[in-house]
């Protein structure tokens, strides 16, 4: 009898550096006058090797990679030779599935677009391009360094260079109206990319926008108007052939981000680089966040870990529900039971589920649970009501 193949892995690689810090951004991104590229390449390779050694020691060395994601920061600022070295090392450590997805986040500047062909030669086959807006005034408001013309030129280069392209846009911007956003949406659909990501502008702690809100210099959009734009977004993209498969992500059939599906389906993923998180063999991992602290940890210990936490079954079951219910496909309660040992009957509040099903906000079978199109607008409240673990 042939044993089932080992569950594949995903690998996240964090590059923390940006040319400037955007006023809405709370990601682990940093501006530095210079970066020692040789030292950073060596440190990332060491951090990766440590994760590979741990899995081999645990008898998990045969698990291949289904995806790699270079996130940031601005990974398109990485030298292509560093990207190539990391991809090559990952293949040596784990091996690749035949259809591996290798994504790199990129800013649409002319300088970074000039590297796209070299990044493709390095092994990147999917790029996520941060256009963020299709209006020059909005780009200036968002602190972006590019204008629309430069952004669209970079998109054209990306579409020539990579097999798959995602475009990021931010909506619910102050002074934005529904008709203007619909025009922007339809223009984005006209680009012909296989994936689009749309994020509502939120005021995050520690950002410049938070300071401006506190000072009365910035007024966020009304939440009801944000909800109207959310519904408009889903209607327009669905009619345009890129329906939402997750709260903020839209794709043509078969073109969903395989890497992000690993997160939402609560599979194992390894995270290396400053601030990177991972889920490895029922353990949550976290790297040192500040670049200099991460580098110091690599020098001392051979890895950038700052914390490892073994997750109890109840925590894993709760995380699986919270992540999986973001997806249009929902979650398999049976699978969560098998993976965590928590009985299906204990995962969710049955009375709350029945009430929300009757309201048309949930769809439920003994095996599967998913949030309906109507319910996605109320996702946070629904999760708070139904998750019982």
Image (cartoon, rainbow, N blue to C red):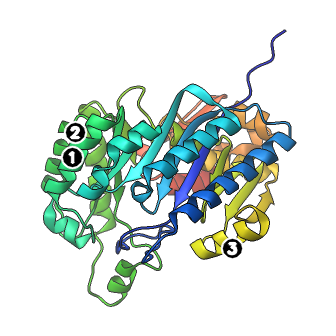
**Between discs 3 and 2, the one toward the N terminus:** 2
* Residue in the foreground of this view, choosing between 204 and 62: 62
Mark 2: which secondary structure? helix
Disc assigned to residue 86: none
* Residue in the foreground of this view, choosing between 211 and 365: 211
According to the picture, the residue beneath numbered tag 2 turns out to be 189
Going 78% across and 66% down the picture, which residue do you hit? 301
Pointers 2 and 1 in contact (CB under 8 A)?
yes
Q: Which percent across, then down, holds residue 161?
A: 31, 37
Tag in front: 3 or 2: 3
Does residue 184 lie above or below 217 as drawn? Answer: above
According to the picture, the residue beneath numbered tag 3 turns out to be 296
Q: Which percent across, then down, holds residue 213?
A: 34, 83
Going 58% across and 72% down the picture, which residue do you hit? 291
* Residue in the foreground of this view, choosing between 302 and 374: 302
According to the picture, the residue beneath numbered tag 1 turns out to be 185
Q: Which percent across, then down, holds residue 335?
A: 71, 32
């Amino acid at each position: 009898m042939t044993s089932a193949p080992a569950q594949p892995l995903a690998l996240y690689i964090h590059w923390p550096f940006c040319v400037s810090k955007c006023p809405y951004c709370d990601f682990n991104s940093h501006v530095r006058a210079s970066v020692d590229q040789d030292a950073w390449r060596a440190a990332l390779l060491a951090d990766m090797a440590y994760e590979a050694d741990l899995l081999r020691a645990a008898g998990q060395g045969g698990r291949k990679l289904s995806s790699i994601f270079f996130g940031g920061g601005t990974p398109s600022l990485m030298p292509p030779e560093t990207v190539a070295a990391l991809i090559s090392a990952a293949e040596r450590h784990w091996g690749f599935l035949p259809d591996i997805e290798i994504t790199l986040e990129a800013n649409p500047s002319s300088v970074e677009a000039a590297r796209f062909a070299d990044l493709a030669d390095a092994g990147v086959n999917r790029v996520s391009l941060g256009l963020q807006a299709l209006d020059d005034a909005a780009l200036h408001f968002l602190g972006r360094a590019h204008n629309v013309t430069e952004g669209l030129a970079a998109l054209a280069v990306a579409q020539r260079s990579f097999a798959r392209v995602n475009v990021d846009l931010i909506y619910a911007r102050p002074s934005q109206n529904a008709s203007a956003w619909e025009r922007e949406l339809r223009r984005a659909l006209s680009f012909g990319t296989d994936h689009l990501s749309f994020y509502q502008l939120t005021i995050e702690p520690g950002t410049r926008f938070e300071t401006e809100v506190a000072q009365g210099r910035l007024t966020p959009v009304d939440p009801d108007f944000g909800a109207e734009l959310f519904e408009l977004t889903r209607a327009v993209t669905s009619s345009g052939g890129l329906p939402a498969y997750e709260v903020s992500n839209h794709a043509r059939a078969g073109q969903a981000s395989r890497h992000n599906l690993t997160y939402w389906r609560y599979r194992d993923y390894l995270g290396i680089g400053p601030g990177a998180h991972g889920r490895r063999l029922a353990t949550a991992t976290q790297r040192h966040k500040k670049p200099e602290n991460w580098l110091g940890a690599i020098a001392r210990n051979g890895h950038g870990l700052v914390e490892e936490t073994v997750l109890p079954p109840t925590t894993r079951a709760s995380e699986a529900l919270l992540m999986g219910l973001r997806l249009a496909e929902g979650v398999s309660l049976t699978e969560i039971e098998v993976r965590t040992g928590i009985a299906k009957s204990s995962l969710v509040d049955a009375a709350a589920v029945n009430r929300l099903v009757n309201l048309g906000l949930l769809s439920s079978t003994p095996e599967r649970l998913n949030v309906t199109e109507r319910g996605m607008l109320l996702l946070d409240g629904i999760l708070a009501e139904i998750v019982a673990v």
